[in-house]
Image: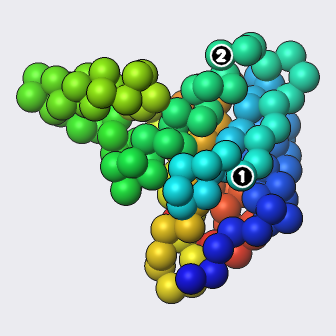
Amino acid sequence: MAELTLQQANRLIEEAINMARKKEMPPIAVAVLDSGAHLKAFQREDGVSFLRVQISQAKAWGALGMATNSDTIAERYNQDDQQRGFINALNAMTGGQLIPLPGGVLVRNLEDEIVAAVGAAGGVSNDDEECVIAGIEAIGFRL
């Protein structure tokens, strides 16, 4: 299994932040978690609000835990009362570590194995997700 290196994780973050600047977004925080949900790399731009640190990590953590991008978790949450109850129960079980909003994306290697997840927070969630995807694509990994 080709794991994500620290150098690749840092470049991914750099590219995500570059995209945020191109889009003229508010300051963002970007977290990269390895496949075991351990923090691999993290940066937050000057001026980002302090909760964005936890939000970016929770988006990535939820993606890893559910083996799906956080936009899919958000879709499930909005699907019906049963799904909303399930996501709320997961959030309670994990001490609030799951954020059902776009911006948490799985990172796959060329063998299609999940090697990491990235989460961003600071802008509108769909913009956060776009920045993360730009970072993943810049380092040559798959979504």
Q: Earlier in the sequence, mark 1 or mark 2?
A: 1
Which residue is identified by label 2? 51
Q: Residue at x 60, y 42 (%)?
A: 119
On screen, residue 83 versus residue 102, left or right, reads: left
Residue 8: % across, % down: 79, 66
Q: Is residue 57 above or below residue 1?
A: above
Query: How is the rendered protein coloured?
Result: rainbow
Q: Is residue 127 above or below residue 50?
A: below
Which residue is identified by label 1? 40
For marks 1 and 2, give the CA distance: 19 Å
Is any atom of residue 97 visible in this view? Answer: yes
Which is more toward the observer, 22 or 54? 54
Mark 1 burial class by Cα count in 10 Å: few <14, some 14-19, many 20+:
some
Say which element carries label 1.
strand
Residue 11: % across, % down: 84, 59
Say which element carries label 2.
helix
Residue 123: % across, % down: 66, 26
Q: Is residue 52 above or below residue 24?
A: above
In this view, the residue farthest toward the right is: 46
Quadrant occupied by the N terminus? bottom right
Give the residue type at disc 2: Leu
Q: Which mark is residue 84?
A: none
Residue 104: % across, % down: 52, 44
In this view, the residue farthest toward the left is: 82
On screen, residue 48 versus residue 60, left or right, reads: right
Give the residue type at disc 1: Lys
